[in-house]
Image: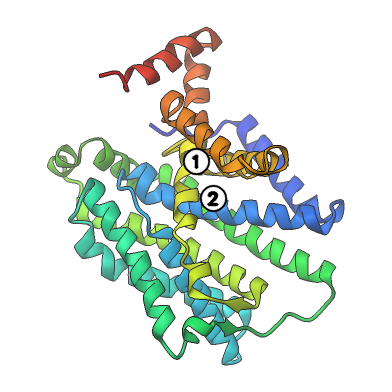
Amino acid sequence: MFRPWTKNQWILMGMGAVALILLPSFSENDVIRKWMDILMIAILAISWNFIGGLTGYPSFAPAAFFGLGAYVTAILMKAGFNFFFTLVIGSAFGGVIALALGIPILRLRGHYFAIATFGVAEFFRELADNLRITGGGDGINLPQITGGPDYFTRFFYFSMLGVAVLAFLVQYFVTRHRLGYGLVAIRENEAAAAMTGIDTTKYKVIAFVLSSVFPAMAGGVYAYRAAFLEPIDVFDILFSIKAIVMTMLGGVGTVMGPIVGAFIMEYLADYLWGAFTEFHSAFLGIIIVLIVLFIPRGLMAIIQELRLKGWRSLGPILRSNVQRFKV
């Protein structure tokens, strides 16, 4: 289960936060934009972790809520509303939609639930593609931010950083709260969790709502930064797939896993693109398969186990992971 962080862990986290705050002061715009992308996908991974990692319900819905938040920001900003106000409204709208959808579809489990959430993302993409208010397939333009490229880059970087910090803090406190323990109990054995008095429906719906709020907020930041939206761009199911893969790499159900996974996978993808331009997707696919085979619980889960058992246990831990796939 979850343990409170030690003093050293909080110090390391504080140092990381300071480094992210100071990053724009000593980095070029290209580096800042790269970290903006890392923060965005980390937000999606953290959000997926609420429903997929802690609760054990694999979801493809992050792309749906990301797109919803993007379009709410676009529509409201065209109407003259303040950008930050649109983020609040967009996240609230995403939460309400998740609440309305979560009650019926969370009756499904396993791949049935996953397919249902995939359908949700496709439904909203088709809806945005055919509504006049969204611009349909022609897309929608947003008001452009005033200022030079340096101001532009830093404004959106700190906006995305703010959403990422908020998502991380909520995740941390959920895992140290009764809600977090209840979600893990549902993941391990939902029937047993219900027998102990946990309102499994309520807990699952809360997790689903939490998994919708932050992608919607990140979608709003993305929309203002892009200044032009098309349904195919913001409802891209690849957003959900990336969130799942990065959480698996970093550590499913862990606090730091989504962030670690986002950082490693984004830079690994860049390296493979530069080193193997024609075959980078194939190499990336092989690496993902190896992750599933050797570290299905993610890097942070293995690190936590090594802290308890020592580094000599690394071999047995990896062998035990591979053993699960033997027939």
Local packing at callout 1 (Cα closer than 10 Å; few below 14, some 14-19, many 20+) is many
Q: Helix, strand, or loop for circle 2?
A: helix
- The answer to whether residue 179 of the structure is visible from this angle is yes
Q: Residue at x 34, y 16 (%)?
A: 323
Q: In which quarter of the image is residue 150?
A: bottom right
The image shows residue 48, relative to residue 73, as above or below, that is: above
Q: Which residue is drawn at 79% across and 56% down?
A: 30
In the drawing, does residue 224 fall left or right of residue 59?
right
Q: Closer to the N terminus: mark 1 or mark 2? A: 2
In the drawing, does residue 186 fall left or right of residue 36?
left
Instruction: Please name whichever residue, 179 or 201, is drawn nearer the observer in this view of the structure.
Output: 201
In the drawing, does residue 246 fall left or right of residue 15?
left
Instruction: Please name whichever residue, 80 or 318, is drawn nearer the observer in this view of the structure.
Output: 318
- The answer to whether residue 203 of the structure is visible from this angle is no
Task: Estimate the x, y position of residue 156 in percent, counting from the top left.
Answer: 70, 66
Q: Are marks 1 and 2 in contact (CB under 8 Å)?
A: yes
Q: Distance between the residues labelled 1 and 2?
A: 8 Å
Q: Residue at x 41, y 72 (%)?
A: 125
Instruction: Return the residue found at the far right.
Output: 26
Indicate the quadrant containing the C terminus: top left, top right, bottom left or bottom right. top left
In the drawing, does residue 200 fall left or right of residue 68?
left
Q: Quadrant of residue 116?
A: bottom left
Task: Estimate the x, y position of residue 133 in percent, counting from the top left.
Answer: 46, 89
- Identified by mark 2, the residue type is Phe
Task: Estimate the x, y position of residue 113 in percent, counting from the top left.
Answer: 25, 53
- Residue on which disc 2 sits: 168
Q: Helix, strand, or loop for circle 1?
A: loop
Residue 255, which numbered label? 1
Local packing at callout 2 (Cα closer than 10 Å; few below 14, some 14-19, many 20+) is many
Q: Which residue is drawn at 77% across and 71% down?
A: 152
Task: Estimate the x, y position of residue 81 in percent, counting from the top left.
Answer: 59, 87
